Amino acid sequence: MYSLLEAQNLIEKHLQTFSIPDTPPELYEPVKYILSLGGKRIRPALVLLACDLFSGGVESALLPAVAIEIFHNFTLLHDDLMDRSELRRGSPTVHVKYNENVAILSGDVMSILANRLMNQSPGVVLNTVHDIFTRTAMQVCEGQQFDMNFEERLTVSEEEYLTMIELKTAVLIAASLKIGAILGGSSQKDADDLYEFGRNLGIAFQLQDDLLDTYGDPSIIGKKLGTDIVDNKKTFLMIEALEKASSSQDRELTGWLTKKDFDREEKISAVVSIFDALKIKELTESRIRDFYNASLLNLKQLNRPEERKAELYNFASFLMNRNR
């Protein structure tokens, strides 16, 4: 059995030797650049771990795993452009280093390259794997659109938000596991259980990101706290606060959400005070536990020996305790 670290290292090694066209350089250099910025390679590593869980070998899963990583980085490239982000993993984003038109076109070619690689899956499962991949790619785009829609709205329901983060974040984690399982020869039920494990864990992961942005340790998470508050992001915390606020608290929150000129620290302090009064931190932690425990139940139901599932249990624990 591969460990998560071994799977990550194998992906990294394969990416370094993977051939990307050179011409025209204006198109392909940004692709090489964003892939060179690193990252944890979690999603492609999950493809390998899921495949290894059933087949005891990962050769058939290497190209599909690389496809997942290239697609993931394509979404980051376009997200950075839409969000006007200047840094990605401590380096200039593609649209900053090159320009916006280059970022759009290089992102497009990454999406096509990912699709081409996924099409090199073994023929016996090609149609199934390709269908999962293309459906997931569409869902990620749907999630991004919902996220942008929410920026224009003052209120968003909890159900709408959970759907958005499922599409934008969780389904790619889930699909990575399901594709790996199918490549490894799993049953349909086992592949579905792994998908649900990844989906629930992915939602818990995003909820934790929301929580850490307000209540994390800045020395660990590597950024200032309160960015979501300053940017008026409709996170789980803000959604719950708006739903549970008294009339006066609602007026204050709405005031901060609509105010154009403000002191950053004053806004963060005022909003966090309302969060504290409404026990939003505790509520969010409870919802994280709900989804995390659901993911563990999905993994427990998987028809494989418990010792062979140990690395996925370790991964779930690692993901949920990475910045606490």
Image (cartoon, rainbow, N blue to C red):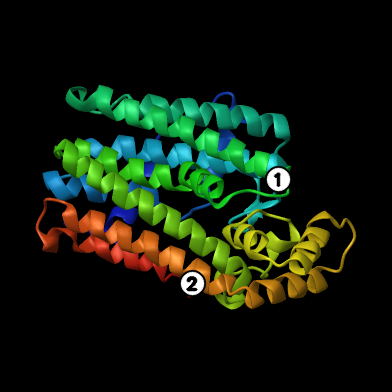
Q: Residues within 10 Å of mark 2 (few under 14, many from 20)?
A: some
Q: Identify which residue, 250 or 314, lies in the foreground.
A: 250
Image coordinates of residue 100 in percent, x first then y, are 72, 34
Image coordinates of residue 186 in percent, x first then y, are 15, 40
Mark 2 lies on residue? 323
Which structural element holds mark 2?
loop
Total number of numbered labels? 2
Residue in the picture at 34% in, 40% down: 175
Amino acid tagged 1: Glu
The outermost residue toward the left is 305
Residue in the picture at 55% in, 49% down: 161
Instruction: Using the rendered image of the protein, determine whether residue 58 is visible from the camera's viewpoint.
Output: no
Instruction: Using the rendered image of the protein, determine whether residue 241 is visible from the camera's viewpoint.
Output: yes
Give left or right: position of 96 versus 108.
Answer: right
The outermost residue toward the right is 261
Q: Is residue 302 above or below residue 82?
A: below
User: Mark number for residue 151?
Assistant: 1
Give left or right: position of 138 versus 117.
Answer: right
